[in-house]
Amino acid sequence: MSTFITIVIIVGFILVISIRQVNEYQRGVKFQLGKFTHVVSPGWRLIIPIIQSMTKVDMRVKAVDVPFQEAITRDNISAKINAVIYYKVTHAEKAILEVENFWFAVNQLAQTTMRNVVGEMELDELLANREQAAKKIKDIVDSATDPWGIGVDTVELKDVILPEDMQRVIAKQAEAERERRAVVIKSTGEVEASHNLAQAAQTLSSQPGALHLRTLNTLNDLSSDQSNTVIFAMPLEILRAFERSGQQ
């Protein structure tokens, strides 16, 4: 009887240590005698010790923060860039069988790809088209990790840090551009104002009495404020005409 109980206890202990739980967001890569057999779906699974083994793979989307990388643009300007890569395992068996540490491999591949992509772009192009650069990095990394059973969802460039002297140059360039735009806008306004004044002068000269009405309207505006002093400018010929009439 004691022998039977001992056997039952041993069998029960073996069963307990043989049960493996695979969560819903995981897949299990099962091996038997060192050979891959199949991918285990979520749930409780029986793994015979010594003979069988199982490696769990997280299938959720992962975010990898790629550290700052020193890169040289095509126009020989040094810049530090970092990014975030969102990827997930699409085939659990490939992620275990084809690469030793897929997380580390994706991180290293992303760093190298970032430096290469930045080296193919000029600084102005990089600053103006971050999305284009991120898409190019994403396509390259996604293509390279496809044999590993990994799919890259998206790549986001976080920061592009330039040397201080280059930041001052860009600031001066932006200030000069703003001044140029201000001059262009001011000159455009002066041109439009001159056209409007010319059109108004033509209208006043073509209509009899229009200039007098405009003069009276101006005098009315000036008389609304008692502090204004109005000076009339009269042609010299009129004064001489008054002088001649007085002598007669």
Image (tube, grey):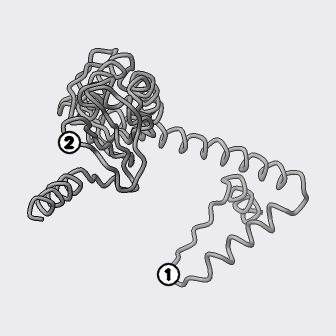
Taking 206 as reference, is 69 left or right? Answer: left
Structural distance between the alpha carbons of marks 2 and 1:
106 Å
Q: Amino acid at mark 1?
A: Ser
Quadrant where the N terminus is found in the figure: bottom left
Check disc 1: other Cα within 10 Å, few if <14, some if 14-19, many if 20+: few
* Vertical position of residue 43 compared to residue 88: above or below: below
Quadrant where the C terminus is found in the figure: bottom right
Q: Which residue is mark 2?
A: 49
Instruction: Please give the name of the residue rendered at 42% of the width and 22% of the height, measured from the top-left corner.
Output: 147
* Residue 22 image position (x, y, % from top left): 34, 52
Q: How many marks?
A: 2
Taking 47 as reference, is 2 left or right? Answer: left
Check disc 2: other Cα within 10 Å, few if <14, some if 14-19, many if 20+: few
* Residue 51 image position (x, y, % from top left): 23, 35
For label 2, the SS is loop
For label 1, the SS is loop
Residue closer to the observer: 244 or 19:
19
Please name which of the two marks, 2 or 1, marks the residue nearer to the observer: 2
Taking 141 as reference, is 194 left or right? Answer: right
Say whether disc 2 or disc 1 marks the residue closer to the N-terminus. Answer: 2
The reply to whether dot 2 and dot 1 touch (C-beta < 8 Å) is: no
Per the rendering, the mark at residue 227 is 1
Q: Amino acid at mark 2?
A: Pro
